[in-house]
Amino acid sequence: MASAPQHAHPRKGDRRDGSVYSPTSEIITAVQVALITGRPLLLAGPPGCGKSSLASFVARTLDFDYLEFVVTDESSPQDVLWNVDVISRLRDAQLAAGGEQLPPLSDYVDPGPLWWALDPASAGRRGAEETAEAGRPCGKPVHLKGYEPQGAGAVLLIDEIDKAESSFCNGLLVPLGSRQFYVTDINTLVANGGDRAPESPLVIITTNGERDLPDAFVRRCVVLAVEGPNAERLEEIVNLHFPAIADDVVLIERVQQLAQRFAKNDKEHASTAEFLDLVSVLLTLGSNADPQQWELIERLVVEKPSLRRDLFAAW
């Protein structure tokens, strides 16, 4: 297999570092409403329309901490709050049977992302009292490498909540609504505040619509339907990610043609990530790709649903 071009452009699709984003006026207003009301912001829309990447962008814009939790079909609501490392505790209990002292239960508590968002100071102590002897410290998870926020607040992304059963949403109704929860294992109340996050965290939740969410959960959120980008939005986003394209008239025209094509044809509608990948290939290959090769490239990168249908029919 031939090696990649030496001047290949960095990966742009599915970028989640928050450094580049083009929010619409609707998104800006929705974020403002969520910040004012303290309600979670629920973003609903097709995959690849930019829902998840908004959270890290808002965190950087506000200079807030950024935390995230990606939901799977095995996730439980407690995973967002806290867990106990029962394996380590069992191991240490066996050692303690030989005469060693068993550490306090708080040493085995692993704070979840909502705990870190509400009160990072107590999360760093694993819920132990400030006056207690120093136990096993807990390091805050890092989701944006090299990002060191200075603001006193946090943005928490709960991504693809529709992957889980409705019990996941129901289990988070009270913690997200009251911005507090009780850690039953160590009899500790976690509440918004502390010396690091006096502001109420902004919780951004995304759904692709694979499952209907409970009405009670939706009512507690600020809800915004995020549509797939039209041609104008695709061109705007491309210019943000590839500013050098403004100096090449030929590339600008090619990107405009592609944007118009995929915005008009629902069957070939590209997500933002897929379209950025396509432009990255275009910038790398330039005029070296002949029409037949470029047709294949478009099928590989964007036209995957129709390609799958054709393959299944052939088989």
Image (cartoon, helix red, strand yellow):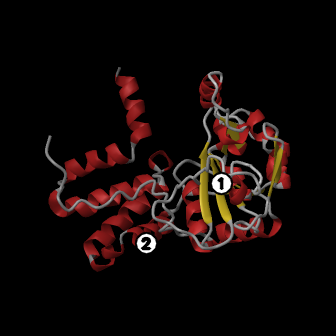
Residue 302: mark in rendering: none
The residue drawn where x is 58% and y is 73% is 61
**Rendering quarter of residue 196:** bottom right
Element type where label 2 sits in the image: helix
Query: Quick one: 291 or 243, which is closer to the camera?
Result: 243
Residue 240: mark in rendering: 2
Is 11 placed left or right of 193 in the picture? left
Residue 89: image location, x then y, percent = 64, 30
Extreme residue in the front direction = 99
Quadrant where the N terminus sits is top left
Specify the amino acid type for callout 2: Leu
Q: Which residue is mark 1?
A: 124
Residue 90: image location, x then y, percent = 64, 25
Element type where label 1 sits in the image: helix
Residue 227: image location, x then y, percent = 60, 57
Quadrant where the C terminus sits is top left
As drawn, 23 above or below 2? below
As drawn, 288 above or below 245? above
Whether residue 287 is visible: yes
Is 121 placed left or right of 236 in the picture? right
